[in-house]
Image (cartoon, rainbow, N blue to C red):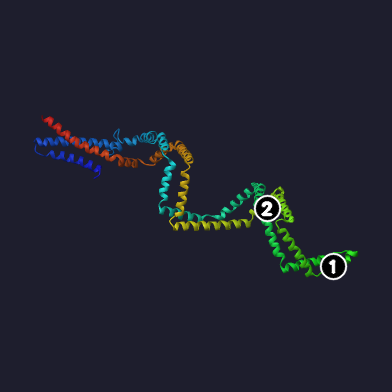
Amino acid sequence: MKSRNLATISLAVMACGFLITLFLPENIGTELLRGGFEAGLVGGIADWFAVTALFRHPLGLRIPHTSLLLKNRDKIVQSLISAMENELLNKASIENKLRKVRIVSLGSGLLTKFMSRKKARTEILGQLSALVQRLPVEHAVPYLQTALADYLRDAELGVAADRIATRLMNDGKDTAALDYALEGISGWSGRPETRAMLGKIASEKLAEVKLGGLKGMAFQAFVGFMDADMLGEMLQGMLQSGIRDFREADSPYREEMIREIRVAIFQLVNDEAKITALKDWAQKELQGEEAAAFLRQQLEVFRGKAAAMLEEDRSSGGRRLFALYAMLIRRISGEKEWIQGWEERIRASLINIVEANHFRLGVLVKENLDQMDDASLVNMLEDKVGKDLQWIRVNGAVCGFVVGLVLTVIQMI
């Protein structure tokens, strides 16, 4: 039974009891009951008036000093805001509480508890997979092109190329490249079609030579004696013999060629004009359609692999995700100074936020209360504190009844 109904019933009982005693035979018992019910009726009505006067005008009559809550609405709101800002949720208490909390440890514990749940991990992976699938990679291509071009423009390619060339030479990559080239040339020069091509070229060039005198006669005799096949075979043998000499480790020709290659490489990497021209060419190519199509294709491939990896881990319950999280936590937990630094930074940020926005608590309370009309405010207060106030009415009626009995006895005496 609601306290409001109970209070009304108690008042009705007192009123009915008093009326009934008016028609009962006069005796001591009737006088005692009449005195008790009369005092209880007076006490109940008085307390009903007092409780009702807090929220509204009793019986709709504008009696002075009634509807106290509505008349003092602004004072009550300001008092509530003041109590919240200065007593219940004052800045000092919030800041002291924040200083006692180990924010990183608390967050880590909550996150670990969350990540230990298989359902949570699969949900995270599902959301990540959906996000990866929706990423507009084509929109990222222009920004990626610009970033690469800017990096290339500011990069010290000459220094980097010099370091790379030095490292490659120290590792013997220049000689390895020479041996590879010689091997390829040797294979090419040993082909029959190469021999035929060399013979044809030599025959054509010899026919173009014009010499007079005895030298001319001797040269013409030599050309007449040698046909294209013989010239090709001779040149082929000479070429392969030279290649074999270059491939010998102790060959002076080999050492000279390697030295010339190294000199040419260092001249190239230290040529500012050529490096600048190379950078300009590369930047221009990066901004072209072919580079954009290549980057878009690579991003699509990367997205497909990432989505497939996420789906695979999702089907296995997020084991890789949890392993990655555990590895990060173990790594971070060993960095005591790093954790302490983040604790201080986060705490300082939260304290600054509290100091800068503490007044908003009062603003929020006032805005919410201002949005409520008088009837809604009265109903809210009655719902929160009205139950206890209605018991005042019940207690008033009961206490009045008891006091009425006592006073009647005293009167009789």
| Image quarter hosting the C terminus | top left
Query: Label 2 to label 1, Cα distance in Å?
Result: 51 Å
Give the mark toward the camera: 2 or 1: 1
Residue 121 visible to an observer of this rendering:
yes
In the image shown, does 18 or 133 lie closer to the viewer?
A: 133
User: In this rendering, would 10 be left or right of 266?
Assistant: left
Q: Secondary structure at mark 1?
A: helix
Residue drawn at (57%, 53%) of the image: 140
Place of residue 394 in the rendered image (x, y in percent of width and height, measured from the top left)? 22, 39
Residue 133 visible to an observer of this rendering:
no
The three-letter code of the residue at mark 2 reads Trp
The residue singled out by tag 1 in the image is 222
Place of residue 1 in the rendered image (x, y in percent of width and height, measured from the top left)? 23, 45
Q: Are marks 2 and 1 in contact (CB under 8 Å)?
A: no
The residue singled out by tag 2 in the image is 281
Within 10 Å of the Cα at label 2, are there few (<14), some (14-19), or many (20+) other Cα atoms?
few
Total count of labels? 2
Q: Earlier in the sequence, mark 2 or mark 1?
A: 1
Residue drawn at (88%, 65%) of the image: 216
Location of residue 237 by image quarter: bottom right
Q: Secondary structure at mark 2?
A: helix
Vertical placement of 95 versus 220: above or below? above
